[in-house]
Amino acid sequence: MPERVLVPFDGSPLSEKALDYACETFGSTRITVLYVVDSHRDDTAATGWGDHPSEWDDWLDDRREHAEELFVTARAVASEHDVDVETGVAVGRVVEAIIDAIDFYDADLLVMGTHGRSHLEEFVLGSVAESLVRRSPVPVTTVR
């Protein structure tokens, strides 16, 4: 049985389902819920924030507040199983940020939905999950 489970969480129904599965199956282990601020999405990269660091900081603060709102939902899902979860926020490209978080949190299992919220969801359905299955240094359990 794993000792530390990492669950990427974006508030989508499948990320909630993945967290529910992790809590039900691995509730006695340490579970960390991770929200990734995708700093490389087209709608953020095109703004030219390199010249306006205060706008970047404001945007990042907004994303962190959004993460805290999502963590309320995550804690509610976990509490249905009498499980306390840790939470964390990472900033960067989603796949790389999750791989870095696996190391940072010393996770030995990744549990995630097969796809989540994306502005191109209908076009690149599941690309993050597929990339992580291929590149993760630890086993990956996908939930659909």
Image (cartoon, rainbow, N blue to C red):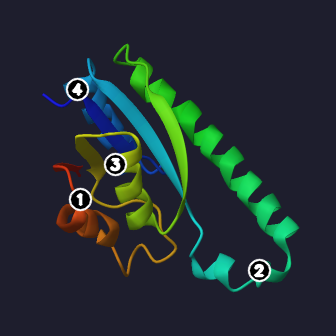
Cα–Cα gap, marks 4 and 1 = 19 Å
Tell whether 108 sits left or right of 72: left
Q: Residues within 10 Å of mark 1 (few under 14, many from 20)?
A: some
Q: Residue at x 23, y 66 (%)?
A: 135
In the image, residue 7 sits, relative to residue 99, either above or below, namely above
Between label 4 and label 1, give the one nearer the viewer.
1
Q: Residue at x 20, y 62 (%)?
A: 133
**Viewer-nearest of labels 4 and 2?**
2
Question: Spatial distance from mark 3 to mark 1, Cα to Cα?
Answer: 8 Å
Is 131 left or right of 91, judged from the image as shown?
left
Mark carried by residue 26? 4
Disc number placed over residue 102 in the picture, else none:
3
Q: Tell which circle, 2 or 3, labels the residue nearer the N-terminal end.
A: 2
Question: Considering only order in the chain, which callout, 2 or 4, is on the residue closer to the N terminus?
Answer: 4
Q: Position of residue 2 (x, y in %)?
A: 18, 31
Mark-to-mark CA distance, 4 and 2: 42 Å
The vertical placement of 66 against 2, above or below, is: below
The mark nearer the N terminus, 2 or 1, is 2
Mark 3 / mark 1, whichever is N-terminal? 3
CA distance separating discs 2 and 3: 29 Å
Q: Secondary structure at mark 2?
A: helix
Residue 125: x %, y % from top left: 33, 72
- Give the distance between the C-alpha atoms of the residues marked 2 and 1, in whole angstroms: 31 Å
Residue at 21% x, 56% y is 137
CB under 8 Å between callouts 3 and 1?
yes
